[in-house]
Image: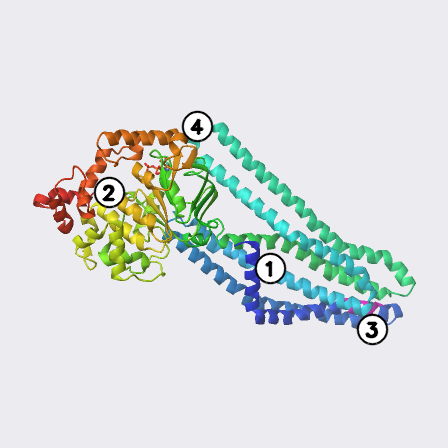
Amino acid sequence: MDEQAAGVRMRGYLRERARGLAVLAGWSALESGQTFLVGYAVAKALDDGFLRGRDATGLGWLALAAVAVPLGAYGTARVFRGLAVLVEPLRDILVERVVRGGLRAAVRGRRSGDGAVVSRLTHQVEIARDTFGGLVLVLRSFVFTAAGALAGMCVLAPLLLLIVLPPLAVGIALFAAGLRPLARRQHAYLAADEALAEECGALAGGLRDITACGAEPLMAARADARTDTALRTARALARWGVLRAAALAIGGQLPIVLLLLTAPWLIRTHRLTPGDLLGALTYLTQSLQPALQNLVHILGAAGTRLGVVLRRIGGEGDPPDPAAAAEHPAGPGRALHFHDVTFGYGAGAEPVLKELELAVRTGEHLAVVGPSGIGKSTLAALAAGLLRPDRGEVRTAGRPALVPQEAYVLTGTVRENLGYLRGGGGAEPSGGAGVSGRADDSRGAAEAAGSGGPEGADPGSWGGPEEPGAPQDAELLAAADVVGAGPLVATLGGLDAEVDPARLSAGERQLLALARTYLSPAGLVVLDEATCHLDPAAEAVAEEAFARRPGGTLVVIAHRISSARRAGRVLVLDGTHAVCGTHEDLPARSALYRDLVGGWSAADSAGCADGVDTAGAAGVSGSDPAGDLRDADRVHPVAGPRLPGDRGEVVAHGAVGQMQPAGDLGDRGALGAQ
Ligand SMILES: Nc1ncnc2c1ncn2[C@@H]1O[C@H](COP(=O)(O)OP(=O)(O)OP(=O)(O)O)[C@@H](O)[C@H]1O
C-alpha cells in the first residue's frame, strides 16, 4: 500500500462516515465559541470595564469568559464520544485485514511462526487506532480553535488579521510541505533500523558458521554498512525535524512578536485599543499557538508513524501473493522477467542466484540446465512466486504453474484429478508414496503448493481457478492424450475410475499431474524435472505438448540434454553467472554447456539413446543414464511407443491396470510405492 493509495483509502473511509464527522464538527463548534468568547471578553473587560473605572462591567465580562470554559469542556467531552464512531470501525477493518493476511500466509505455508501477525493484531492495530484518534482530535481542535480565534480578532479589529494571518499561513504551509518528505525519512529510518536489527540477529545466530568459514571481516563490513545507513537515516530525520521547529516559530511565535512590535504605534494612532491588544494576545498565546504546537508535534510524529503502521498492516514486507504477482505484467510480450535477481537461502548465505537477468517471451520454450545444486529448482520456485528474491524483481504475466519432480495425485476420480485446476476439484490432495518426506522444508512446501494444490498457481484458492470453467469430458480426455496420459487414463478405467495414488508409479503420477496442468488456465508453465520419471519419448511428447499449448509459455528445468535440444533457448546456470542462447550457439559460448553436450554425445554413442541426465553428463549428479532407462521400462507401456531394451510390456500393462502387488506382479507393486 503506497502513500497515495493509503490517502485515497483514508479519504474514502472518512467519506463513508460523513455523518459522524458532522456530529464531531457540531460539538467542536462549542470549542470555537469558547475560544472566541475568552479573547473577546478579556478585551471588553479591559476596554469597557477596568480602563473606564467600571469594575463591575469588567468583572461581568470576565465571568462570561469563565462560563465559556465549562461550555467548551462539555463540547470536548461530547467530541470524545463521537470519536468512537470514527475510530472503532478502523480498528475492525485493520484487524480483519491482519487476520486475512495472516491466514493467507499460513495457507501458503510461507510463515513458520505467527509472531508478526500477533504483533500486528495487538500492538500495531492499537497504535494505529490510538494515533488515528489522536490525529482527528488534534486536527479538529486546531481548525475550530483557529476559527474561533481568527473570528474574535476580526470582530475586535480586522487589522489584527493582517498582522497574524501571513506568518500563520507561512508556518502552516511550511509544515504541510515538509510532511511527506518527513514521512519518507521516518520510513527510511525505521527500515534501516529493522535491517540493522535483522543483520545483527543473523550474525548472532550464525556466529559459529561465520567463524568456521573465516567470514568475520565480510560480516563485519556488512554490519558496518547497515550501521552507517541507520546513522545516515537518523541524521536525515533529525534535519527534517528542524523544519518543524521553523514552522512552529514562524506560524506560532512570529505573530506575537509582530503584534508586540507594532502595538505601541497602533495604540498611539488609535487603530487598536489596549483591550484589542490584550484580546489578541489571549487568542495567540492561549489558543492559536498551543493548537499549532499540538498540530505540528502530533501530526509530524504520530501522523508519519500512523502511515508506517498502516503500510505494515497493509502487507508491506509480506511475501507477495502469487495471485497478485500474477497480475504484475512482466513487460510487453513477456511471460516472465527476472530483473537483477539475487537470492540466497538465509541471511549471510552465499547467493544461489546472483544478479540474474532473464526475459522469457510469451509463447517461448526455454530450457534451464546446469549441474546439480546450481539453483535450477530455486529459479523455478522464484518464477512461480513461491520464493521471493532478496534483491531485484520477478514478474510474470498471468498465473504461473509449477510442476515439481514429485507429482501429487489426488484421492478421487481421474476426472477430479484432471479437472482440479479448472474447478473440477473435490478430490483430496495426496502426496502418494515418496513425497511426504520433503514437505517440511521450504522447498518441500513449495512443491506441496505447486503440486498438491493447483500446480503452483494460487495455493490460496484450492477450489481451483474459476476461469475458464469446469472442462467437459472430451476436453479432459484430449488433454490427457496430448501430454501422453491417454493410455494411462484408459488403463485406469476412464474418467470415472477411482485413483489410488499409492498404487501409481512415479511416472504415472507425473502424467496425471501434467495433464492437470495442461488444462489449467496458467499461461506460464514451469516443469521442474516434472518428467524425470518418464522415458525420453514420453518426456518429448509431454514437453512438445506444453510448448505447443495455445498462448502457453514453457520453462523446463531440464533433466536430460534432449530437453535442451527441443527448446528454443537454453539458459545455462553456471555458478555465479548464467549464459542464455540456443543449443547451436551455446557450445561456443559456454564451457559448461560443451561439457554437458559432450557427456550426452558420449552416452549416446554408448547406446543410451538420448536419455542422459544433463547433470550426469557433467559428472555431478548422482543419477545415471541407466536409471532413466529403468524408468522408461516402467512407464513406457502406458505412454505408448517402445524403446530399445524394453521388457515385458504385457506384465507392465497388467501392473498399470490393476496394480496388484502380488504374485508375478510383485515387482510392479514395488514400483507403485516408489
Ligand atoms: N530450502 C533450502 N534451504 C537451504 N538451502 C537450499 C534449500 N533448497 C536448496 N538449497 C540449496 O540451494 C542450492 C541450489 O539448490 P537447487 O535445488 O535450486 O539446485 P538444482 O540446480 O535444482 O539442483 P538439482 O539439479 O540437484 O535438483 C543448493 O546448494 C541447495 O543445497
Q: Circles 3 and 4: CB distance less than 8 Å?
A: no
Question: Marks 1 and 2, how far apart in space?
Answer: 70 Å
Magenta residues (range): 39-46
Q: Which mark is residue 57?
A: 3
Q: Amino acid at mark 4?
A: Thr
Instruction: Give the mark nearest the N terminus, 3 or 2.
Output: 3
Give x and y (percent) for residue 65: 75, 69
For this orientation, the residue located farthest to the front is 584
Q: Circles 1 and 4: CB distance less than 8 Å?
A: no
Residue 5 seen: yes
**Secondary structure of residue under mark 1:** helix
Instruction: Give the mark nearest the N terminus, 1 or 4.
Output: 1
Instruction: Describe residue 19's horizontal placement relative to residue 159 as left or right.
Output: left
Q: Circles 3 and 2: CB distance less than 8 Å?
A: no
Question: Would you name the residue on which mark 1 appears?
Answer: 134
Q: Nearer the viewer, residue 210 or 390?
A: 390
Give x and y (percent) for residue 9: 54, 61
Question: Marks 4 and 2, how far apart in space?
Answer: 50 Å
